[in-house]
Amino acid sequence: MDRTVLHMDLDSFFVSVERLMDSRLHGIPVLVGGVSDRGVVAACSYEARQTGVRSGMPMRMAREFCPEAVVVRGNSMEYTKHSKVVTEIVSEAVPVLEKASIDEFYADLSGMDRFFGTYEFAQELRDRVIRESGLPISFGLSTSKTVAKVATGEAKPNNHRHVPRGIERMFMAPLSVRKIPMVGEKTYQSLRALGVQRIATLQEMPSELLYQVLGKPGLDLWSKAQGVDDRPVSPYHERKSISTERTFEQDTLDEVKLKGMLAAMTENLAFQLRRGHRLTSNISVRIRYSDFQTVSRQRQIPYTAADHVLLEVAESLFRQLHDRRQRVRLIGIRFSGLVGGGEQFGLFELDDRGYRLSEAMDRIRIRYGDRAVVRAFGMAAQTIGRPNPFSGDPPPLLANRKQ
């Protein structure tokens, strides 16, 4: 049976979600990421890319390249929500789905040509994703994961490309070796030292030479240059952890600010758990000091997604870790051991005020946005809020700390 692999990639996903929420961002350069000079670009619009901005670039440099760009702080909750919408659409339609990242998918369509054309099927699926999610998406279709992914890259933005069996090598030949997914900067420089810039050159080289230079990865690279990639599409599994961290614009000794930041991040992740009907059984807190020493501590807990439980554990871990004599550069929190399910009260737990407060706050967040209400002690984390790039945000509602 001939193998057929579909690769789908949401175009400039973070930017596309921001534009879906705020139409004023359409048609202008947009940078998503940390808004301070220490921040990095998590995603950028195609308008910004034309000025030389790239993902992973320091935000300070990106602003120099594209001073007219609107900078938006990332909103992981919204990105996760929209990714889930697309995941559900695609998973319902294909026999085997692999979710490679928050915005990237592989599907094995082998054998479906017996019933209808896979290329026509992929086009209809893409149209459905765009129609139901409102997000632009591109796809590549070929006989392997590597060629399908490269084809998607060539189709972008918001288009599609089919590389039929027999022409994979011809399709790959004129492209830069950077187009091969496994080629990073270090590998690229090694290939440049050999005089290799185009995939066609790789195709004509003896595989033994690449093995001598790069070891076993060199043999994998040679095979992929030929369009050969036997890796299977691995079925999609739910993520087992969620995390977030914040780097301060200036290293700080302010314990109130640190605790407020940690509390705000804990609340945000807990809300993500409840909205996704998930529970966590492990909490980890991480601190990085100004000398880049990083310390962390974790604790196993009964499965929960309750704010008041998670906040108490997070604060306890912070107290065990924090050295008041050193300035803090970064603080982060991670929930792991995730499972599906809903909150259950303990056998002797009669006071449900904490749960009722979380439910009330969740209703406000669902209606007005996930940053619409926070506990008062989380207000110290001013940088947590997602700023409106065009006007000042109204202050969030406050929830009483005492439950």
Image (cartoon, helix red, strand yellow):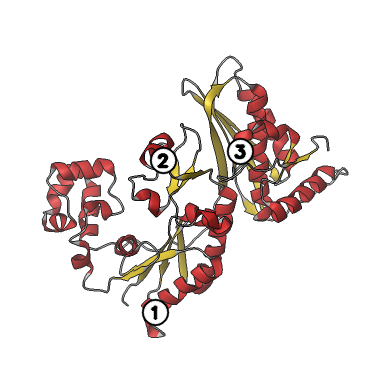
Kindly report which numbered mark, 1 or 2, lies closer to the viewer in this rendering. Answer: 2
Residue type pointed to by label 3: Ile
Q: Residue furthest right?
A: 350
Q: Position of residue 164 (x, y in %)?
A: 27, 74
> In this rendering, does residue 279 appear at all?
no
Q: In which quadrant of the rendered view does residue 41 lie?
A: top left
Distance CA(mark 1)–CA(mark 2) = 42 Å
| 348 horizontally vs 69: left or right | right
* Residues packed near mark 1 inside 10 Å, few (<14), some (14 to 19) or many (20 plus): few
**Local SS, label 2:** loop
* Residue 67, numbered label: 2
Check whether the beta carbons of the residues at disc 3 and disc 1 lie within 8 A of each other: no
- Of labels 3 and 1, earlier in sequence is 1
**Residue drawn at the location 21% of the way across and 58% of the way down:** 175
**Local SS, label 1:** helix
* Residue under pointer 1: 120
